Amino acid sequence: MRPSIVLAFLPVIAGCGGSKAPPPPKAPVVAKAAPVAEAEQAPAAAEAPKLPTACAGDGDICKMPKAFVDRLCQATYPNLALLFFGKTAPWTHGYMTGKTQAWNAEGGASVQGVLDFDEEVLLLTAHTPPKGGMQVTGAGGYQGLRWDGSCVTLSSEEVTTRRPPSPKHPRIEWRWIEDGMRDALRKDPKVDAAVVAWRRECKGISVGDVSKKCVVEDQKLGDAIVDLVRSAGGLPDPQKLP
């Protein structure tokens, strides 16, 4: 009996002691995913604001898109005004039929003061009275842009598109103009000479305490800028956009 027992277990003993441990299982092969397009890997960068260059919609005036005007009239953009008043820009020009208080009915920024008789503005959008409602004198009108970059609300009686012999403009502050726009303006000899004279007479003078010479040179500088924009235009797009 004993020999048969020993022989019965010999295969088991030989199997346990005579072979090496089995190799570990191989990791499953995973196919590489196709590369994701760059546009899918990260959200697309926000597009830079686009400036209007053509009339929006029909009507008697060359209007800007209302969404853009809404943004424009929330702040003051003197550099954009210089671009939009340019000779080749398509926007409709209006001229004040009398003096009127400057105000912005859209609730945005407004430069306080008075629009002078014959002052030039751009007519951005037209305010149309509701159809079927009571017709009130002066209910129509426009949202306008002044040379200083501020928006004003005007009634139809306050403005005309007939150009006067010498259109006027409000004061243009050199310190509000961006460096790139300044460089472009000063390429004109008249503007450059006006800047030099303005700096000579107005250097170090605080607001509300200016000399008569400073007032004269400040007006000359504004006139030189307006004359250049009206006759040539071609200024660069500003950095600050609505």
Image (cartoon, rainbow, N blue to C red):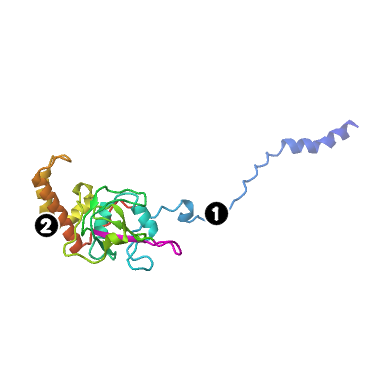
Number of numbered markers: 2
In-image side of 216 versus 169 (left or right): left
Q: Residue at x 17, y 40 (%)?
A: 208
**Label 1 is placed on what type of residue?**
Ala
Tell me where residue 35 appears, x and y as whole percent: 50, 55
Can you tell which mark lies on residue 190?
A: 2
Q: Which residue is mark 1?
A: 33
Of 130 and 123, the residue lying toward us: 130
Q: Which residues are magenta?
A: 120-135
Can the viewer see residue 100 in this picture?
A: yes
Amino acid marked by disc 2:
Lys
Residues packed near mark 1 inside 10 Å, few (<14), some (14 to 19) or many (20 plus): few
In this view of the protein, which residue sits in the foreground, 177 or 102? 102
Q: Single out the residue that lies furthest toward the right.
A: 1
220 left or right, relative to 72: left
Residue 52: x and y, percent? 34, 61
- Furthest toward the top, the residue is 2
Q: Position of residue 39 (x, y in %)?
A: 46, 55
